[in-house]
Image: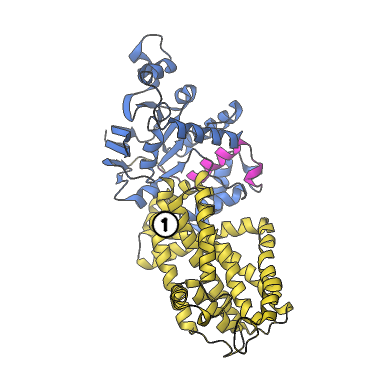
Chain colours: A yellow, B blue
């Protein structure tokens, strides 16, 4: 039944991928990194995208932030408003990058790239995670821009290695959450036009129903309830805990922030892995 | 047929009210090149998508290398290579990078990657272009790269969906030579869809003519020609088996897709 020819090598790799759960998990991570790596090679070749994306947070901090700080309309306790705002704008720029990340899968579907990846022995979760990781790396570069800008504006930030590592992890985790959310949307709506529409509709509610530019304590009850289920709130809370000098803003605790983000990510990757094959049907 | 690597049995796929594949059964022998021809909307791409595990069948079954496409999709995926009709090489990466990512996704052992990639580049005639961005490639080079990407793991079955659509005659020759090389050196089984009768005649040992999702005829090019008359050509055979009906509803989608690919490659 088996034809002659080079059957040895495929069966070797088959055995490897069929082994213990541990090696299946290793294959998942390895392939996710392979997908993300290609994304980053493209980004390194054409970084103009990053430059144009830096403009929006600059405007939020230098225009919106300065005016609101002078108006003294938002009570942020002993923390100056602009200090309060920096982690919020940081998370916002991460959100804006990640939420449109999903459109790449529609491009790649219109070409045949997604077809080829889906016909390869790659777990769907690795394709989703790879894209999310690519989004995370982009967001990290963006975060650096916002942090430098904050320092230029005279914001007092915790810059110890441990705080920066914590902030970096939150940036990556948050970007992965919203990237996989965005990918799920792309898999459902399937066309660029619809995706852009839905993306615009989703971004602003996510942003305003969070603690990005005002504390949730100032919100009406219904809005505070929405903010409480918004992953962005936990990302920003964690970023404030890491970056702002101790105790100045009340927070939920890093344990809660990381747990909520990680659980959301796992849920979204699982969901998106199921939706992913539908994009080529 | 005990040495069949593709076995399709009573396969059906419906999209709403449209039956794209209608109780289709046939087999492809190991080491052969089988052509799948038919008019736009005849169900060729649907069959390929089912066999490559991208689309579930409505009913019936398909086995590739002994594995059921629905129950054992991962085993099928490891055994096959697939070149979609649309462009599947990433234009913003180099030829080498395009090959590298596929080597990783197909679990080509790290030690063998360099050798396999070099060999694939040679077969595709792309040795000197491997460090260039694919955006700068010609249409024929892109197709050759895509075939190279899909054969790095030495698949037992290769699916080619209209590999020469939109290519000029020289580029088509380049792709044909590449397929000949694969036939000779890797001895893999190839299922190819095409609209070009000269291509089907040149490449295929056997040809399956699909018409409205059904198998209208199956045989070697010579057998098919004899079946309808002494001095028949393959074009005549094609017309004989498929002319009875106007183009089907899916033809618009397929036509626009083909034109887009042709535009990008041209």
- Looking at the picture, how far across and down is residue B169, in whole percent? 59, 26
- Drawn side of residue A246 relative to residue B16, left or right: right
Location of residue B58 (image quadrant): top left
Examine the residues drawn in magenta and state their main secondary structure.
Answer: helix
- Drawn side of residue A268 relative to residue A196, left or right: left
- Looking at the picture, how far across and down is residue B87, in whole percent? 54, 41
**Quadrant showing the C terminus of chain B:** top right
Q: Residue at x 37, y 33 (%)?
A: B43
- Looking at the picture, how far across and down is residue A258, in whole percent? 47, 78
Decide which of B40, A150 is in the foreground and name it: A150
Decide which of B203, B232 is in the foreground and name it: B232
Location of residue A274 (image quadrant): bottom left
Q: Is residue B83 above or below residue B203?
A: below
Question: What segment carries the magenta color?
Answer: B132-156
Q: Residue at x 31, y 42 (%)?
A: B57
Residue A207 inside the magenta-drawn segment: no
Decide which of B37, A266 is in the foreground and name it: A266
Counting every numbered tag in the picture gives 1
Chain identity of mark 1: A
The residue that disc 1 covers is: A124
């Amino acid at each position: 039944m088996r034809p002659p020819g080079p059957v040895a090598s495929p069966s070797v790799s088959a055995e490897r991928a069929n082994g213990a759960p541990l090696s299946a998990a290793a294959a998942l991570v390895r392939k996710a990194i392979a997908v993300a790596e290609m994304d980053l090679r493209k980004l390194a070749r054409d970084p103009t995208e990053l430059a144009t994306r830096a403009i929006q947070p600059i405007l939020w901090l230098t225009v919106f932030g300065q005016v609101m700080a002078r108006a003294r309309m938002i009570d942020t306790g002993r923390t100056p408003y602009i200090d309060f705002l920096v982690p919020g704008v940081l998370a916002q720029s991460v959100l804006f990058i990640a939420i449109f990340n999903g459109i790449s899968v529609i491009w790649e579907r219109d070409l045949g790239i997604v077809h080829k990846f889906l016909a390869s022995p790659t777990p769907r979760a690795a394709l989703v995670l790879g894209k999310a990781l690519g989004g995370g790396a982009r967001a990290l570069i963006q975060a650096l821009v916002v942090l430098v800008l904050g320092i230029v504006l005279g914001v007092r930030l915790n810059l110890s290695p441990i705080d920066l590592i914590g902030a970096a992890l939150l940036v990556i985790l948050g970007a992965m959450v919203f990237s996989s959310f965005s990918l799920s949307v792309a898999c459902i709506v399937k066309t660029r036009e619809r995706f852009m529409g839905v993306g615009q509709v989703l971004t602003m509610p996510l942003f305003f129903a969070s603690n990005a530019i005002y504390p949730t304590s100032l919100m009406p009850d219904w809005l505070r309830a929405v903010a409480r289920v918004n992953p962005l709130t936990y990302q920003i809370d964690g970023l404030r805990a890491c970056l702002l000098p101790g105790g100045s803003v009340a927070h939920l605790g890093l344990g809660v922030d990381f747990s909520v983000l990680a659980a959301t990510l796992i849920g979204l990757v699982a969901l998106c892995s199921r939706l992913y094959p539908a994009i080529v049907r | 047929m005990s040495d069949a690597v593709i076995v399709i049995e009573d396969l059906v796929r419906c999209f709403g009210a449209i039956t794209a594949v209608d109780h289709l059964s046939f087999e492809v022998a190991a080491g052969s090149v089988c052509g799948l021809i038919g008019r736009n909307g005849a169900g060729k791409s649907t069959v390929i998508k089912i066999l490559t595990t991208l689309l579930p069948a409505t009913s019936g079954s398909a086995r590739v290398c002994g594995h059921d496409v629905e129950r054992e999709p991962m085993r099928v995926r490891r055994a096959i290579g697939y070149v979609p009709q649309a462009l599947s090489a990433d234009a913003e990466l180099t030829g080498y990078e395009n090959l590298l990512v596929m080597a990783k996704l197909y679990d080509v052992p790290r030690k063998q990657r360099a050798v396999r990639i070099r060999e694939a580049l040679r077969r595709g005639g792309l040795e000197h272009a491997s460090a260039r961005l694919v955006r700068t490639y010609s249409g024929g080079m892109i197709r050759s790269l895509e075939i190279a990407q899909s054969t790095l793991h030495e698949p037992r079955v290769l699916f080619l969906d209209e590999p020469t659509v939109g290519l000029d005659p020289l580029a088509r020759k380049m792709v044909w030579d590449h397929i000949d090389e694969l036939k000779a050196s890797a001895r893999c089984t190839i299922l190819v869809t095409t609209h070009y009768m000269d291509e089907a005649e040149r490449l295929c040992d056997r040809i399956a003519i699909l018409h409205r999702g059904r198998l209208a005829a199956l045989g070697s090019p010579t057998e098919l020609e004899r079946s309808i008359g002494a001095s028949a050509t393959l074009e005549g055979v094609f017309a004989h088996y498929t002319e009875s009906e106007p183009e089907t509803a899916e033809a618009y989608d397929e036509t626009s897709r083909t034109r887009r690919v042709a535009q990008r490659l041209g």
